[in-house]
Amino acid sequence: MKRRPWRELGLPAKLFVSFALVSVLPIGLLSGLSLRHLLNIQQVSVEETRTLLISAQLNRVRERLAEEAVRLSGQFTRLQDEAHALASLAQAVLAEPAAFGYRNGSRYRLAADGSFGNSEDDGRSVLFVPRYAPRLAPLVDATETLDLLMRPIAAREPRMVLCWIILREGLTRAFPWRDFDEMPRDKDYTTWPFYSRAGPEENPGREEVFTDLYLDPLSGEWMISCLAPVYVGAAHVATVGIDITVGNLLRDIAAIRVSERSSTLLLSGSSILAASGNLPVARLGLDPARPSLGQDLTRSSEDEVRKGVDVLLSRSEGVEFLRGELGSFLGFSSVSPPGWKIVILVPESDVIEPAYESAGKVLVETSRIRRNFVHILLFSVLTMVGLTWVVLAHQSRGLREILRGVRQFGEGNLHYRLPAGTGEFGRLAGALNSMADGLLGRKRELQRVYAQVEQERKLSAVGRLAAGVAHEVNNPLATISTYTQLLLRRGDLPPDAGRDLKTVMDEVQRIQDKVCGLLDLSRAQSPARTTVDLNRLVEEVADLTRHEANARGIALDVYLDPRVPPATLDRSGLKQVLWNLLGNALDAQDDAGTSVRVSTRFVPEGPELVLEVEDEGPGIPEKVLPKIFEPFFTTKEVGQGTGLGLAVSYRIVRDHGGRIEVENLRGGGCRFRVWLPLEDRA
C-alpha cells in the first residue's frame, strides 16, 4: 500500500493528526509529572488555605465595618445638613420676623402660672414659653414658619424623635408635639448643655455639633442631639436641634453582624453609646449589674481590653486580637462627623473554625484530583474528536452562508447581508457586504439621475406644449380684453352691464395669470443674474406674505444667517420660488398648524446657500412625494391650484445649478430645502 503524502491528506485527517499531537501527548506527559507533585501541593495548599481564609474573614470584618461606618456617617451627615437648613431658616426668621407671614393654625393660651403655648396636640409644632411677655408675640408668630421645615424633616427621618429650637428670649418650639407642662418654669434653658453646647464658648466655629449622651427631661430617655447655632449678626440668638434616642441607635447597631456570636458597640471615645443585646459585658471586665450603656471600657478589669481600647483610640480603623479568656477579634472603624467608632467583637472560633473546615475540604478535593487525571485524559481525546467535528461543521456552514449570499446578490437582492465575523469567512462576508453596499449606492444614484432626466424630459415636453397653448390662448384673450375695456369706458352702460364686464375682465386676468405660469415653464433662457442679498430678498417676500399669514392666524417666523454673503442670482426667479414655497406652506396648515418658518443658512464647505421653508401641516403622503415637482400635479382641490408652482420653482433652481429637496418632519409638517451654489454650476 502506497503511503499518501501529508499535502494529499484531506482536512479531517489533518485536523485529527494535529489535535492528537497538540493535545493528547502533552496531556499524558503532564499527567504523569503532575502526580508526583500533588502530595506536596496538597500539604502546602491546606496551610495556605487556612491562612488565606482567616485573612479573608478579617477582611470581611474590615469591609463590613467600613460599609456600616459609611452608612452611619451618611445618616449623621444628613442630620447635620438638615440641622443646618433649619438653622438657616431660623436665622432669616429671627433677623426679620415681620417678613414671615406664614401661620400654622395653632391656637395658644396663657396659663395661670404665666406660661404660654398650645398645651394640646393639634398636629402642629408645640410652643412653650415659660414666662410670656407681649413683646414675644412677633417671635411666636414668626417661628410658626419653621413648621415648613420641621414637618418634612420629621417625616423623612424615622430615627428622629424631636426637632426643636430654643430662643435666647426663652421661647421653645418643637415638632412633633410633646407635653411641655412638666418642664420647670423657673429654669433658664439657655444654660442647659443642649443649648450652650452650640454657643460661641464651646463652638467658636459655628458648626453643627453632636452632644454626648444625656437624659431627656421630657421622655426620661437617653438620647443624642445634632445642634446648630443661630446667629443674627454677631449674637447667638438661638439653637436648633434634632434628637435621636439611643433606642433607635440600638436597632441599627444590633443589625450589624458578621457571625452568629459577634456583638457590636458604638463608642464615643471609650464610653459605650449603644451596644447589641449579646454584648459579653462580664467578659469585657465591665459591671454586669449595670446596662452596657454609658460604661467606660478604660475602666475594664481586663488588661487585654484596656490595651485594645488604647489602640482603638489611637487609630481610625483596624482589627486587633484580644488574648486571654476573651479570645476575640476586635474590629473598629471611625464614624464621622460625630467622631464615634463602630466596633465589632468576633469570637476567635467564629473566624478560625470556618478556615479549618474549608482546609479539610481542600484536602478531600486534592485527593479526588489524583483519581480524576485518568478521566481527564479520556475526556481530552473525546474533546479532540468533538472539536474536529465542530470545526468541520463550522467551515461547511460558513461556506454555505457565502454561497447563499452570492446567489442573493446575483438575483438582484442587494439588501441581503451576510453575517460578519472575525474569521476568514467573516472577513469574506464583510467584503461581499461592502460590495453590495457599493452596488446599492450606485443603483440609488442611477435612480436619482434617471429621475432627474425624466423630470427634465417632462418639463421640456410640457414647455413645448405650454408655448403653443399660451400663443393660441393669448391672442383671443387680448381681443376680449381690448373690447371689454372699450365697453367699460362708455358712459351709457347700465350698472348691471358694468358689473358683468368687470367680472369678465377679472376672469380674463385670471386666465392670463395661468398662461404666464405656462410661459414660465416653457422658457429655457438662462437666469438674469445680478448681485442679490438673499437675506434681504427673504425679508421682502416675508413682509408681503405676513399680512395673509396673520389673517389666517398663522405666525410667520424668519431666521436669517448673518454669515450669508451676497451672491450672483436671478432675483426675480428666486423671488418667485420663495413666493411659491411660502404660499404652499400657508395653504398646507390645518387646524393644528400655527406657524411657518423660513430660514437661510451659509454652508462654507460648498460653498452653498441654503433656503428652508417649514410648515406644521399634515405633511405630504409618501406615495405622492416623487410626483410633486411634475407639471400640473397638485393635491389641492379643483380650482385651487394648477400644479405649476413647484414645477416652475424646480426649473428656476435647476437653472441656478442648485437642487431642491423635500422631506416630512417627524412631529408633523413638511420642509422644503433649496441649495444654491455660490458659483454657477449650471
Image (tube, rainbow, N blue to C red):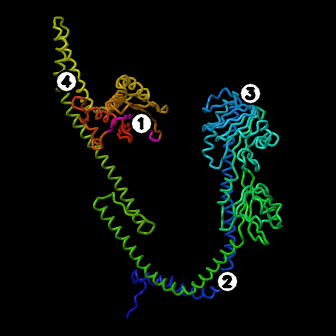
Quarter of the picture containing the C terminus is top left
- Label 1 is placed on what type of residue? Val
Query: Which mark is in front, 2 or 1?
Result: 2
Query: Which mark is in front, 2 or 4?
Result: 2
Of the pair 308 and 381, the residue shown nearer to us:
308
**Vertical position of residue 502 compared to residue 665: above or below:** above
Which dot marks residue 133? 3
Q: CA distance from mark 1 to mark 3?
A: 78 Å
| Secondary structure category for the residue under label 2 | helix
Query: Which mark is in front, 2 or 3?
Result: 3
Q: Earlier in the sequence, mark 2 or mark 3?
A: 2
Q: Dot 4 corresponds to which residue?
A: 474
Q: CA distance from mark 4 to mark 3?
A: 104 Å
- Label 3 is placed on what type of residue? Ala
The answer to whether mark 2 and mark 4 are in CB contact below 8 A is: no
**In the image, is residue 618 part of the stretch drawn in magenta?**
yes
Q: Dot 2 corresponds to which residue?
A: 43
- Label 2 is placed on what type of residue? Gln
Where residue 372 appears, x then y in whole percent? 54, 85
Q: Earlier in the sequence, mark 2 or mark 1?
A: 2
Q: Residues within 10 Å of mark 3 (few under 14, many from 20)?
A: few
Where residue 481 appears, x then y in whole percent? 19, 17
